[in-house]
Structures are given as structure tokens and as C-alpha cells.
Amino acid sequence: MPSHRVYFNNHAGIRLSGIIELPNPADFSGIPPQAFALFSHCFTCTKDLKAIVRVSRGLARHNIGVLRFDFTGLGDSHGDFSTSNFESNLADIQAAIGWLATEYQSPQLLVGHSLGGAAMMASVNMIPSAKAIVTIAAPSCTKHLAAFLGKLSPSIESDGVGTVTIGGRTHTIRDQLLNSLRNFDLTTAIQEIRIPHLIFHSLADETLDYHHAEDIFAHTGGAKSLITLVHSDHLLVNQPQDVTYVSDLMATWSERFFAVP
């Protein structure tokens, strides 16, 4: 399956890194991809998270090209993560869309995991090409993450900066990120979604409670479906077979919308 690394600049001129996953031409008799998807990762994760890689390649097996990329200061992207925030994530998504539109075609499918799902939901109305959105273990608000980070490192509040260790990696967090997360009105953004929305969430998710999926389902404005994963954890690690299930169902569900004008 063809895949290769790509680079593009964000609005601040910072070089971001991505991987473009393309369908194998031999599997589709040389027919071009039926559509392209953009995939955004979870908070402090990267494009190389195992579940993201496997879902992206699963979509490629359904003749859907996928761009997965690292947000500013994470993975192979340049920049200082401590100066990034939710709004800069949205700007990075716009930069990724610009590159994809120039090099291939604008994305018709938007996919986001966890906070990346929140960023995709907040970006929908700025992406005219989008025909469908899929969120995996996504929050219905961003305030919960601000509260979690504040408890994890109280010095962020008292001194304006602190460090947190997530997934074995230590990151510097500034209070501007907490303010960004507290003040962003994700509920309104979700209510303004008008394209079909597929929501995946696990009842066993210990990082983000299932009620977030219920809230998203209640508020999202387009045609919607909620798929409950029974035993999966937040990163889809402990039930590897669920990754194949998610990618296959995502592809089958989204294909019906690609031809819609």
C-alpha cells in the first residue's frame, strides 16, 4: 500500500509533517481514490499512534486516500507545543486541507480521535468539501481537559506554566492552553454541524466517559449514528480487532455520501 511522508507549512510558517496513505493501484485497476480523508490525532498523540495508522490504512484498502499529520510541536512537526492551543490546532487543520487540496483533492471525509475529533467538529463549517465526519472517543466539550491538566499540574494555574506526563512523555503546558480550552464553545460548533456524523465511543473508555458521545449525538445537527464499542480503551489498544471494525464500518458508511452534490 503506497504511503509517503509529506511536509507543509502552517499559517505561522512552521513546518508540519504528515503521512499520505494511498490505495494500492493494483487493487483498484488503477482507478483513482474515490475520495480523500483528513485524520487528526488526540491530545499529545501523533499521526503514528498505532490505531490511527491502522484505521488510515484500512480506509486506503477501501480506495480512500488519507492524510494524517502531526499538530504543531508534536511528532515530526516543528514548533513549540507549549505555545499551541485549540485554536492553533484548527489553523493546522486548515493548513493540512490546503496541502491536500493542492496536491490531490480537498477532503470529503473528516476523521478525528479524541481532542482531534473535537477539532474536526469545530472545523466542519470551514471545510466546504466535507461530506461526512467521523469522531472516535471525542469529547463534547473542551473544558474537561483544562480541568484535568490543571489538577495534574497545579503550577500551570499558579505560575503560568507547568509540566505534565501523558503516555510516558513529559510536555510543558502554559496557562494560555487552559484558557483556550475553557473558553472554546464546542457545543455551539457541534450544533452547527449539518453533514452526516458517525460517532464511535466505548463504554469501557476510562479516559473519556461515554456521556460525551451521548452529548455529541444529542447536539450534532446532521444525520447521525452512534456506534458503541463494548470493551475498547481510549486508544483502541486492548481490542485490536476493533480497529479493523472501525475502519471497515467507517468506509462503508461514508462511501454513500461521496457522490452527493
Image (spheres, helix red, strand yellow):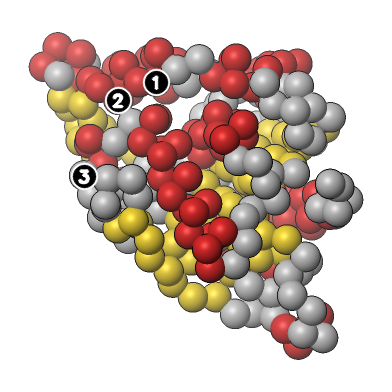
In front here: 96 or 237?
96
- Residue 232 placement, left or right of 12: right
Give the quarter of the image for residue 159. top left
- How packed is label 1: few (under 14 Cα within 10 Å), some, or many (20 or more)? many
**What residue sits right under mark 3 in the picture?**
80
Q: CA distance from mark 1 to mark 2?
A: 6 Å
**What residue sits right under mark 2 in the picture?**
177
Q: CA distance from mark 3 to mark 2?
A: 13 Å
Q: Amino acid at mark 2?
A: Leu
Q: Check the image and report above or below for 197 versus 237.
A: above
Residue drawn where x is 63% and y is 61% of the image = 105
Dot label at residue 181: 1
Q: Check the image and report above or below for 211 versus 33.
A: above
Q: Secondary structure at mark 1?
A: helix
Asked if disc 1 and disc 2 are in contact, CB closer than 8 Å, the reply is: yes
Where residue 253 appears, x then y in whole percent?
A: 84, 48
Residue drawn where x is 60% and y is 41% of the image = 127
In front here: 122 or 147?
122
